[in-house]
Structures are given as C-alpha cells and as structure tokens.
Image: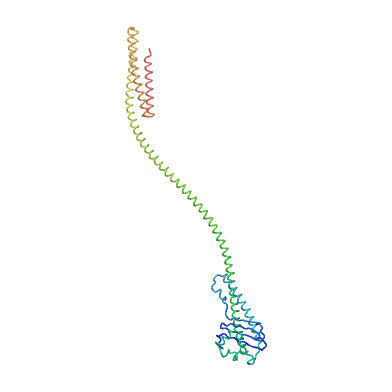
Amino acid sequence: MDMDSPTSTTIHPQPSFEKLHITLSTDSSLNISLIPDSATGLSPTNSIEINNGTSPDSSSADNISDDDTEKETSEKRISFLRDEVAVGSHKIRQLEQIATDLPRDMPSTPSTRSIPQSPVSTQYLHTKMPYEAHPYRSNWATTSHVIEHLQGTIDSLKRELKEQVAKANEERQGKDALNKRCEVSQLELEQLRLENESLNDVIGTKEQRVKQLERDIEQKKVDVKGLENNQLEYIGSKREYEKTVAKFKDDQERSKAAYDSVVSCKDMLERGYGLRFDQITTHIDRLQTTGKSDKDRISRLENIILLQSKERDHLAALQAEIDEEHERHISALKVLVTSIAADVLDRNGEQTDAQLNETTKLVDELNKTYELLRTPL
C-alpha cells in the first residue's frame, strides 16, 4: 500500500449497521467517520479526526530572552501540551473502543464491498489506484488490515503521547528551573533594591556633603576675594607708607641739612656774638673806668664847687654832657641788645637766649651803676 497517497476505506460491519469511513491523508491525518447505510439516509453519528502533525504554536517560545516572557510562554506551552495529551488520550480510547467493537473476521463477498461516498476520495482512488479502488475489485480492505492500521496508528499516537509527556516533563523542569531562576532573580532584585536604597542614602549623604562643600567653596571664594581686596588695600597702604617714608627721609635729609646749616650758622653767630660780647665787655669796662674817673672828677668838682661856686654852672653843663653821652651809650647798647635778641630768637636756641639774658642783666647792672654815679654825693 502506497502511504504517500491519500487512502479512503469504508467498512461494512453488517449491511444494516453503520459504516466506518477511515481516511488517511499524506500529512498523517487519520479521519474516522461512522456513517449510516445508504438505505437508511441518516446523518453521521460520530466522527474522529487524528492529526499526527505538531501544532504551529509549539515553537513559539524559542527566541524569548526575557525571564518573565519565557516563563509565561513556557506555561502556555505546558498548558497546550496538557490539552494535546488529554485530546490524544481521549482519541486513543475512542480508537481502542472502535477497534474492540469491530469484528475480527469479515467474509470477502460483494455484499461487504461498498463504494466510498466521498467523491473526492473516489476520484483520487481512480487516479492513483485504479485497480484496487475500483468498486468491484477492492478485495484488500479487510477488517484485519484496518485493525492493523488502527493498531499502528494507536502505537504512533502512544509514542507521540510519550513524546508529548516527555516534552511536558521537560517543560515542567524548565518551568521549575525558571521558577528557581525567578526566585533567585527576585532575591537578587530584593538585594539590589536594598543596595539601591543604601546607595541612594549614600548618594543623598554625598549630595548633601557636596552641597555643603559647594557652599564652603563659595564662602572660601568670598573670603579669598575679601583677602584679595585686603591685599590690594595693603599694597596701596604699603605704597603710601613707602611714599611717606621716602618723603620723611627727604624731609629728614632736608632737616639734617637745615640743622647742619643752623649749627654752622650758630657757630658763626656764636663767634660773631663772642666778638660783639667782648666788644661790649670792653666798652662796659671802659664805661666803668670812665665812671670811676667821673666819680673822682665829681669829687674834685664838688670840692671845687665848695671852693668855687662860680664853677657850678660849668659842672652842671659837664654833667649834662655826661648824661647825654651816657644815654647815647645806653641807647646804642639797647639797640645792639635788641638786634642780638632778634637774631638769637630767629637762628639760635636756648643757649643764645641765656647769653642774651646775661647781657640784659649786665646792661641793667650798668644802668644801676650809672644811676648810682648820677646820684649826688
């Protein structure tokens, strides 16, 4: 029998019973239908279709990388495999029931032959197997052959069931592994969450520290700017101080030069005043000598007056001359003392003032002496 071509077989258990219509297509799809006899005209009471192909959705989770998506896809595949296993088990039980209900021996008579009701199957049989599929010559479709074919189908379905169970176990193991991975990932996620919270706290502390450091830096910048301003003010003050020191040094040098000039002038004045003082002393000594001589002369004049009264007028005139000369000398001395005092006040210090005071005292003593000389005896 050619298994690559679709096959349609109709089995008559009895003429009055329902027909069992089995169709095996090229894609390993087995279609079993119980149809009534053509004489009864009833509709089919039962139809079973078995597909050996795998579902197109069985490989939908091959390229999923994410754990949650893979877990969800695995759960869907496990559920789908469970449904397929349940459907396959149900179909196997139905096929086993049908196989047990079929008779073991069936006479190969023309009354047991039946033309397939499906026009597509008839046409296909005429094109592919004209001899065997002819309505009058299909002696090969016996019950034992159908049972053998059904038993093979049942075995293949059992193997497929075992494969599906193995796949389900693998999927379950994968699901358990994914659950473990999810638990580990959940623990890692919780640990990472705790670490993230700790890091957020550390980052918050660091941010506060950074903000504090930024405020400190701004304050340092303000302090540095203030120090720079203070430094500029200090530099300006230093320059002013240097200018003041230079000016003070210049003033000191000028003062020193002026002091040297004053000292030299003082020395010169002292020498000049010494000469003048010597001259005044000599003049005073001469005046004293003159005063003594005048006193002696007055004594002689008094004696002469006593002796000669006529000469009184002459003595009076002489006294007047002496007074005038004395006044003239006193005036000259006063002018000299005044000029010396003015020069001393302008150019000299306390030493010249002391000398001037001594000179003034000396002049006063001379005046007193002169007054005493003028006093009549």
Q: Nearer the viewer, residue 117 or 339?
A: 117
Q: Quadrant of residue 141?
A: bottom right
State whether residue 81 is above or below residue 370. below
Measured as percent of width and height from the top left, residue 130 is found at 56, 89
Measured as percent of width and height from the top left, residue 286 is found at 32, 19
Q: Is residue 252 left or right of residue 181?
A: left
Q: Quadrant of residue 373?
A: top left
Image quarter of the N terminus:
bottom right
Give the color scheme: rainbow, by chain, secondary structure or one colour: rainbow
Q: Quadrant of residue 58?
A: bottom right
Measured as percent of width and height from the top left, residue 64 is found at 54, 72
Measured as percent of width and height from the top left, residue 316 is found at 34, 11
State whether residue 325 is above or below residue 174. above
Q: Is residue 358 left or right of residue 181?
A: left
Q: Nearer the viewer, residue 290 or 126?
A: 126
Image quarter of the C terminus:
top left
